[in-house]
Image (spheres, rainbow, N blue to C red):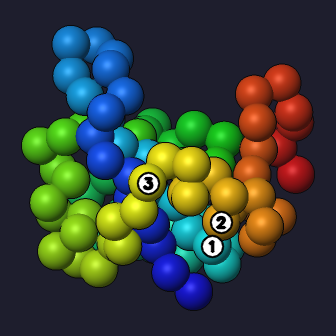
């Protein structure tokens, strides 16, 4: 039952972004994201997009920093991965 965040290395809209995920449930993820002020629109399939300037807020609130490949591995093993083109459960 942990929330993870990868480094802000994903470019988009003139900024760099991180991915915030849970290895337990989407409920845990949504609650954590709300607690750090992530808007609902930042949720995409299985993660929240977090701008680089909010990365520290997520870590301070308890998100564990891990690499992108490890992040994907953990949510896949937890059965929470929702790749593009696959409908949400």
Mark 3 or 1, closer to the camera:
3
Cβ atoms under marks 2 and 1 closer than 8 Å: yes
Q: Which mark is residue 33?
A: none
Residue 67 point in image, percent of width and height: 43, 54
Q: Nearer the viewer, residue 55 or 42?
A: 55
Q: SS class of the residue under badge 2?
A: helix
Report the residue at 16% width, 74% height from top.
60
| Camera sees residue 28 | yes
Q: Quadrant of residue 56?
A: bottom left
Crowding at mark 2 (Cα within 10 Å: few <14, some 14-19, many 20+)? some
Q: Which mark is residue 67?
A: 3
Total numbered labels placed on residues in the image: 3
Mark 2 or 3, closer to the camera:
3
Inter-mark Cα distance, 2 to 3: 11 Å
Give the mark nearer the N terminus: 3 vs 1.
1
Report the residue at 87% width, 36% height from top.
87
Q: Nearer the viewer, residue 36 or 71?
A: 71
Residue 55 point in image, percent of width and height: 21, 53
Cβ atoms under marks 3 and 1 closer than 8 Å: no
Inter-mark Cα distance, 2 to 1: 6 Å
Give the mark nearer the N terminus: 2 vs 1.
1
Mark 2 lies on residue = 74
In the rendered image, the quadrant that contains the N terminus is bottom right
Crowding at mark 3 (Cα within 10 Å: few <14, some 14-19, many 20+)? few
Give the mark nearer the N terminus: 2 vs 3.
3
Q: Nearer the viewer, residue 35 or 6?
A: 6
Whether residue 15 is situated above or below residue 3 in the rendered picture: above
Q: Name the residue furthest top.
A: 14
Q: SS class of the residue under badge 1?
A: loop
Q: SS class of the residue under badge 3?
A: loop
Mark 1 lies on residue = 23
């Amino acid at each position: 039952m942990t929330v993870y965040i990868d480094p802000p290395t994903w470019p988009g809209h003139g900024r760099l972004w991180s991915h915030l995920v849970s290895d337990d449930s989407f409920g845990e993820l949504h609650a954590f994201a709300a607690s750090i002020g992530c808007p609902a629109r930042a949720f995409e399939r299985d993660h929240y997009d977090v701008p680089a300037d909010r990365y520290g807020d997520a870590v301070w609130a308890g998100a564990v920093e891990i690499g992108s490949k490890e992040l994907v591995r953990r949510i896949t093993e937890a059965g929470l991965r929702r790749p593009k083109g696959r409908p949400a459960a």
